[in-house]
């Protein structure tokens, strides 16, 4: 009798476990079907039976970036547009994991839990996707970036609404005629599937002086009353810190405008590793930001083992500092926005984001106090008006900082430009990097200028006609 009871109990337990497992699988199937479809190992779903019947992808103005014609996926007629938006739109291979055709595959192909991919056309809801990007702006940025034949990135986003106007990553290829990558040519295409705007980090050089400035503004009461002397180089912590030129006597604002390494190395040493680290972490250098559920690459600021000279170089954006382009655009946008972040988005249709539980406007994260943001705004504006010149950017009122990140190994530096426009009808933050190039003003500057002028025109900004 006891044996029968034990066996019956065991059967009941197994039966309950089986029913519970079925229930769990059913729940996961219902709630996670879209995620399952979007997985890379289901790439066949988006092949002839998927992207071949996928909806169109449009830019903010309704320009078709990708669409299905006669059962084949075709891309915009302009080669510059196709290449500039490769990493945003994606291609048929789905190797670019952060692209729309990978991230939003189930939405594009109209996958349905009941019908799968075979829902009758008459019952299908629209499965097109409209993006926030402006194809003309992306093409303008790409054409200058591509002329260098260098790895790089350019991003522009509206720091009020969060809409990404431009997101370009190089190197790139034509999604209409993707290359066959083999062992013989793989070095030529190394990293080509990686979106440098979202997923890469680079040595920042002098754009990191924004971080050092924030720390100095908040922790050195007489910062604006001091002067420093730059003789082109100075022994700090037992080794030389060098500058690009001999600046002579400088105030803080002049040191920022003329990007004096000596002054900012001294500021970093005076502030100390704890204060510098605390500021960098508050601003988000060691963190990721969210773009439609995609996490940006984390930057890096770590001076835990740095000596005094290395700490000085860290305040200049050297040592082991790393930043991400989208991260820097967000940081600049926060300065323009009184210290608070508006998360970027590439998806124009908010209903798609809502269905996925994404609320890109909800951040409100404070990177700077309003006072610190106002003072950074003032010094970055002064940098343009006093040093770079207001003849740039087609009449826009711009605050900016350039950087030249030395990387060693006989390579040329990373050329950077980051900043934002203050115009009410053109509230755009930007970041651009050109790897293995040279001075940021010389290389990143022309990319940003071309992209910002086109973006302003596309948005109908009054300052640019």
Image (spheres, rainbow, N blue to C red):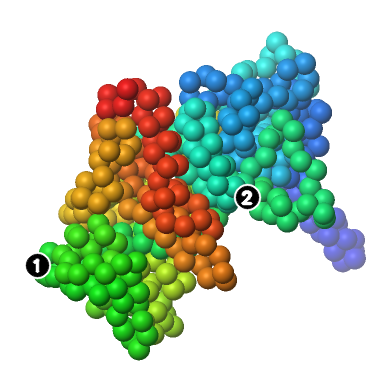
Measured along the vertical axis of the image, is residue 106 above or below residue 115?
below
The answer to whether 81 is drawn above or below residue 260 in the figure is above
Tell me which corner region of the image, top left, top right, bottom left or bottom right, holds residue 212. Answer: bottom left
Q: x, y (%) of residue 448?
A: 41, 42
Frontmost residue, 36 versus 369: 369
Q: Residue at x 58, y 30 (%)?
A: 81
Q: Quadrant of the N terminus?
A: bottom right
Give the residue at mark 2.
Answer: 194
Gap between marks 2 and 1 measured at Cα: 46 Å
Q: Is residue 208 above or below residue 329?
A: below
Residue 224 at x, y percent in the picture: 12, 64
Residue 426, disc? none
Label of residue 225 in the image:
1
Measured as percent of width and height from the top left, residue 30 is found at: 68, 36
Q: Residues within 10 Å of mark 2 (few under 14, many from 20)?
A: many
Look at 66% across and 47% down and name the residue there. Answer: 193
Q: Secondary structure at mark 2?
A: loop
Quarter occupied by the C terminus? top left
């Amino acid at each position: 009798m006891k044996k029968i009871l034990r066996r019956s109990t065991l059967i009941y337990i197994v039966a309950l476990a089986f029913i519970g497992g079925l229930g769990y699988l059913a729940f996961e199937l219902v709630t996670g079907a879209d995620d399952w479809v979007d997985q890379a190992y289901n790439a066949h779903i988006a092949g002839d039976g998927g992207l071949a019947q996928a909806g169109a992808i449009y830019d903010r103005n309704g320009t078709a970036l990708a669409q299905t014609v006669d059962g084949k996926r075709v891309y915009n007629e302009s080669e510059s547009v196709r290449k500039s938006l490769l990493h945003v739109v994606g291609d048929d291979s789905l190797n670019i994991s952060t692209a729309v055709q990978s991230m939003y595959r189930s939405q594009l192909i109209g996958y349905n839990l009941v019908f799968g991919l075979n829902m009758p056309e008459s019952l299908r809801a629209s499965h097109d996707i409209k993006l926030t990007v402006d194809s003309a702006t992306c093409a303008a940025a790409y054409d200058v970036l591509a002329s260098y034949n260098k790895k790089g990135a350019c991003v522009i986003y509206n720091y009020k609404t969060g809409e990404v106007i431009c997101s370009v990553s190089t190197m790139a290829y034509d999604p209409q005629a993707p290359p066959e990558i083999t062992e013989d040519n793989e070095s030529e295409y190394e990293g080509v599937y990686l979106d440098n705007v979202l997923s890469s980090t680079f040595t920042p050089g002098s754009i990191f002086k924004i971080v050092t400035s924030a720390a100095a503004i908040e922790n050195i009461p007489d910062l604006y009353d001091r002067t420093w002397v730059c003789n082109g180089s100075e022994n700090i912590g037992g080794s030389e810190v060098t500058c690009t030129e001999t600046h002579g006597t400088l105030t803080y604002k002049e040191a920022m405008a003329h990007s004096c390494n000596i002054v900012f190395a001294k500021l970093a040493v005076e502030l100390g590793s704890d204060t510098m680290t605390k500021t960098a972490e508050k601003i988000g250098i060691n963190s990721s930001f969210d773009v439609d559920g995609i996490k940006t690459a984390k930057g890096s600021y770590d001076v835990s083992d740095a000596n005094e000279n290395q700490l000085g170089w860290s305040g200049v954006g050297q040592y082991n500092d790393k930043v991400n382009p989208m991260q820097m655009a967000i940081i600049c946008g926060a300065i323009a926005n009184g210290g608070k972040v508006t998360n970027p988005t590439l998806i124009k249709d908010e209903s798609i984001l809502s269905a996925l539980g994404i609320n890109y406007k909800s951040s409100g994260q404070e990177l700077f106090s309003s006072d610190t943001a106002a003072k950074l705004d003032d010094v970055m504006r002064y940098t343009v008006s006093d040093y770079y010149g207001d003849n740039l950017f087609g009449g826009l009122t711009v605050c900016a900082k350039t950087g030249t990140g030395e990387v060693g190994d006989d390579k040329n530096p990373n050329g950077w430009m980051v900043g934002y426009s203050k115009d009410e009808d053109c509230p755009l933050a930007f970041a651009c990097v050109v790897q293995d190039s040279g001075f940021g003003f010389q290389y990143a500057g022309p990319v940003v200028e071309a992209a910002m002028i086109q973006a302003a025109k596309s948005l109908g900004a009054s300052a640019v006609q």
